[in-house]
Image (tube, rainbow, N blue to C red):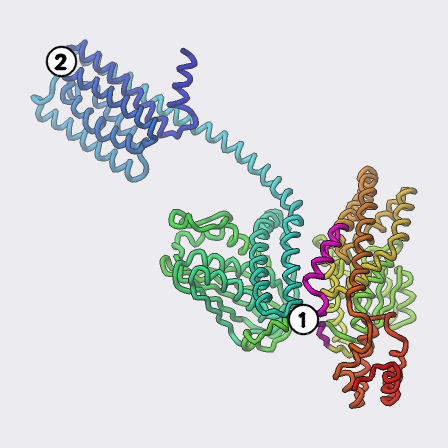
């Protein structure tokens, strides 16, 4: 019996049911019992057969509605039937045949109005309740004016019994309803508190998870984009290039979506950073144009781009963040525009000599936004006017993140919208002008221009590189070989001071973390030297927030994080050399024809075994496979000596030395893309810093394993590259009309520059007689140069 009652209770009044559903079920049960009691009371009071039958009919209807609602789930229909049939039908009829206002029915009228408000929602509840009050009031006025139509109760005793029963039933019903309501409210409050605590815990867990997963999430996307870059760089097939460009755009969009989630975590923790650099304005326009073109075409929308021709051709800012914001504008415009067009517009305002405010707007002819919702669209996870837009995908994060990013760049986002007509979103962000030459017609930017890397040559420049790690020194020398600069290297702060006393350098590259005297201490001593004014660039693997500000405040001219990318390093050096008397010549680096996608694929698979990313390595070597192979050889060449130093430091528990060695290894591995090795070296460095003996002892075996595998893969990679790259046969160079033309026209500068580039790039692989040719050209002896080439069979017809 007890079990049956519990099942009955859970089925009709369980917590899994909504409040209105439980209230209706309770009302139906109560109504059934009350109707039965009323029928018995009417029979005892001698009220006749009709009141008894009416009460029994009410009981039957209540049971039927309860069963129908429970099985069908159509509670709204049952609410309406209850109000129409029982509250507005049977209740007035029972009032007339059951004693009028001398009976307990006025109390049931109050119960009916109260339950109507509980069961219905909004205006429907108020209107229906008001209608009931009018009907019941009119009924009692009618009973007062025409008492002859009212069947009275049999006497005072009957009136008393009826009112006592009515009072008991109404009080029990209202009391139980209030009890259910407040118990549900209190339970909901407790659940909300628990849910709030769980949400905070989940949020913290989410932040930790996203921080740990950011590398894993981005890596496959970056590999895809990196391989696409290779296709764009190597392919000469227009169809393949077009396919690859679409893959690249789709990959970038995917990266934006993933970044939105990661950026939200960074924003919440206050760790979102900007990465500013110089960029071509036309490239930014073209990329945003292509991002929107495919999306708009799929929806059958017109996509227009308007560009003011006075935009500077080169600016300085965070191009990727700007793309992220505007891409969100474009994505929303496409999603919320059924028919019509989208217009992307670029303009400039508050332009000065060095700075200007870049304005980028996206206008659509879509749904528009109601005025009351304009203040909500920048809230995280907010989707306004949702009932009409349930088929539109999105998390509601984009605009919230875009707003935060814009403000982080000292800019802002604005919106104007007319509901049903369309919207305009625009970004205003200050940018530094690098090249104020007007952009003109941005469409004239060619694909060939974008697939070439720029470098420079400065044979008269002399720089000093200071780093205690031999691998890092050799790597920087390899990175700068194509610039023809004279590069001296020293391995300590003390040697740096001695070198500066003996030689005048145009630039000094200084490692931040060195034993004995670190980079900051060495730089302070340099500044104390009489007449010292050489710009010093800090090189460091410490990329945590605040490091750059600390070093720049110390007086360093610039700050570059390790691993250093060749293109980034060259940009910084070129900018500083332009402020000196050194002649800097621009040079375009073209893709080598032998670096085919098939070659890249084979090399990628070979390096993956050793935990090496070809993509990361190529980023640091400006996409030059030959240069990356030479950098890999540096790591392989120093493997035995570096491994011995690490093992010795650990055996004598010299954790300061071990920390220093692991720091250097982390940088060296990062240069060539050996991410597994770099990661484990970082763990050792952190263990030494914190004095965590257990962490060090557990991680070192893994480090040795990763180190060996990385060296094996890098060695095979270098051998493979050297086997397939064109051999240094000078016919390829000197058969060129350009070089031979220099000598025939007796243009010494051009010919010597060609030779300098060749000798610098090929190093010891170049034969000795090339130096003889260069000496002859320096002495303006063009005939001797021609004769040397002829003797070696290199003079073309």
Magenta-tinted stretch: 586-614
- Please tell me which of labels 2 and 1 falls first in the chain: 2
> Residue beneath label 1, please?
452
Q: Distance between the residues labelled 2 and 1?
A: 104 Å
Q: Quadrant of the N terminus?
A: top left
Q: Circle 2: is it few (<14), some (14-19), or many (20+) Cα within 10 Å?
A: few
Q: In which quarter of the image is residue 83?
A: top left
Identified at 78% across, 90% down, the residue is 745
Left or right relative to 69: residue 755 = right
Which of pointers 2 and 1 indicates the residue nearer the eye? 1
Residue 355 rendering spot, x and y as whole percentages: 60, 70
Quarter of the image with the C terminus is: bottom right
Front in this rendered view, residue 101 or 511: 511
Look at mark 2 in the image and give the residue it sits on.
48
Q: Is residue 202 left or right of residue 691?
A: left
Residue 288 vs residue 521, the one in the foreground: 288
In this picture, residue 776 sits left or right of residue 185: right
**Above or below 103: residue 464:** below
Point 40% across, 55% down: residue: 369
């Amino acid at each position: 019996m007890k079990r049956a009652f519990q099942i009955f209770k859970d089925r009709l009044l369980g917590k899994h049911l909504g409040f209105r559903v439980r209230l209706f079920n309770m009302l139906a049960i109560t109504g059934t019992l009350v109707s039965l009691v009323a029928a018995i009371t009417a029979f005892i009071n001698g009220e006749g057969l009709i009141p008894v039958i009416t009460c029994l009919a009410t009981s039957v209807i209540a049971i039927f509605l309860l069963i129908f609602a429970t099985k069908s789930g159509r509670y709204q229909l049952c609410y309406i039937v209850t109000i129409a049939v029982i509250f507005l039908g049977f209740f007035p009829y029972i009032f007339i045949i059951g004693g009028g206002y001398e009976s307990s029915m006025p109390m049931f009228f109050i119960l009916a109005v109260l339950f109507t408000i509980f069961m219905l929602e909004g205006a429907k509840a108020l209107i229906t309740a008001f209608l009931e009050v009018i009907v019941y009031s009119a009924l009692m006025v009618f009973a007062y004016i025409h008492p002859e139509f009212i069947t009275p109760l049999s006497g005072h005793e009957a009136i008393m019994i009826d009112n006592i029963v009515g009072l008991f039933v109404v009080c029990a019903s209202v009391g139980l309803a209030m009890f259910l309501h407040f118990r549900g409210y209190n339970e909901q409050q407790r659940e909300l508190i628990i849910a709030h605590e769980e949400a905070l815990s989940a949020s913290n867990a989410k932040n930790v998870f996203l921080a740990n997963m950011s590398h894993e999430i981005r890596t496959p996307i970056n590999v895809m984009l990196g391989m696409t870059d290779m296709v764009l760089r190597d392919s000469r097939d227009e169809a393949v290039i077009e396919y690859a460009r679409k893959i690249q755009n789709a990959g970038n969009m995917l990266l934006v979506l993933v970044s939105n989630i990661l950026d939200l975590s960074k924003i919440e923790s206050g760790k979102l950073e900007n990465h500013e650099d110089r960029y071509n304005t036309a490239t930014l326009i073209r990329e945003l144009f292509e991002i929107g073109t495919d999306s708009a075409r799929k929806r059958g929308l017109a996509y227009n781009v308007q560009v003011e021709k006075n935009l500077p051709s080169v600016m300085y800012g965070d191009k990727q963040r700007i793309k992220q914001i505007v891409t969100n504008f474009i994505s929303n415009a496409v999603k919320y525009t059924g028919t019509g067009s989208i217009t992307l517009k670029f303009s400039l305002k508050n332009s000065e000599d060095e700075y200007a405010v870049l304005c980028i707007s996206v206008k659509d002819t879509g749904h528009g936004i109601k005025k009351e919702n304009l203040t909500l669209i920048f809230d995280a996870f907010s989707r306004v006017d949702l009932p009409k837009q349930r088929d539109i995908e999105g998390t509601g994060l984009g605009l919230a993140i875009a707003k935060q990013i814009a403000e982080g760049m000292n800019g802002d986002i604005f919106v104007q919208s007319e509901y049903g007509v369309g919207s305009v979103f625009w970004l205003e962000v200050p940018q530094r002008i690098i090249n104020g030459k007007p952009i003109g017609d941005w469409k004239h930017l060619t694909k060939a221009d974008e697939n070439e890397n720029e470098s420079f040559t400065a044979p008269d420049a002399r720089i000093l590189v200071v780093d205690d790690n031999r691998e890092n020194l050799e790597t920087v020398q390899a990175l700068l070989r194509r610039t023809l600069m004279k590069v001296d290297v020293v391995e300590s702060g003390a040697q740096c001071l001695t070198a500066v006393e003996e030689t005048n350098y145009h630039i000094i590259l200084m490692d931040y973390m060195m034993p004995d005297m670190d980079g900051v201490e060495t730089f302070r001593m340099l500044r104390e030297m009489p007449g010292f004014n050489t710009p010093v660039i800090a090189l460091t693997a410490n990329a945590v927030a605040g490091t750059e500000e600390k070093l720049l405040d110390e007086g360093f001219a610039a700050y570059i994080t390790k691993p250093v990318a060749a293109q980034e390093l060259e940009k910084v050096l070129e900018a500083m050399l332009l402020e000196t008397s050194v002649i800097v010549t621009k040079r375009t680096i073209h893709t080598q024809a032998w670096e085919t996608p098939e070659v890249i694929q084979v090399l990628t698979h070979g390096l993956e075994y050793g935990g090496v990313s070809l993509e990361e390595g190529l980023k640091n070597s400006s996409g030059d496979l030959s240069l990356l192979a030479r950098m890999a050889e540096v790591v392989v060449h120093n493997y035995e000596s570096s491994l011995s130093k690490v093992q010795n430091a650990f055996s004598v528990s010299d954790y300061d030395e071990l920390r220093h060695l692991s720091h250097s290894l982390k940088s060296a591995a990062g240069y060539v893309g050996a991410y597994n090795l770099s990661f484990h070296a970082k763990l050792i460095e952190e263990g030494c810093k914190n004095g965590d003996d257990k962490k060090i002892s557990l991680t070192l075996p893994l480090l040795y394993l990763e180190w060996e595998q990385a060296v094996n893969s890098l060695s095979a990679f270098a051998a493979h590259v050297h086997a397939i790259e064109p051999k240094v046969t000078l016919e390829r160079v000197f058969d060129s009309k350009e070089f031979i033309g220099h000598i025939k026209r007796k243009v010494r500068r051009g010919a010597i520059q060609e030779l300098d580039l060749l000798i610098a790039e090929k190093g010891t692989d170049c034969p000795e007689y090339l130096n003889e040719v260069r000496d002859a050209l320096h002495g303006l002896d063009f005939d001797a140069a021609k004769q040397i080439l002829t003797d070696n069979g290199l003079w073309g017809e």
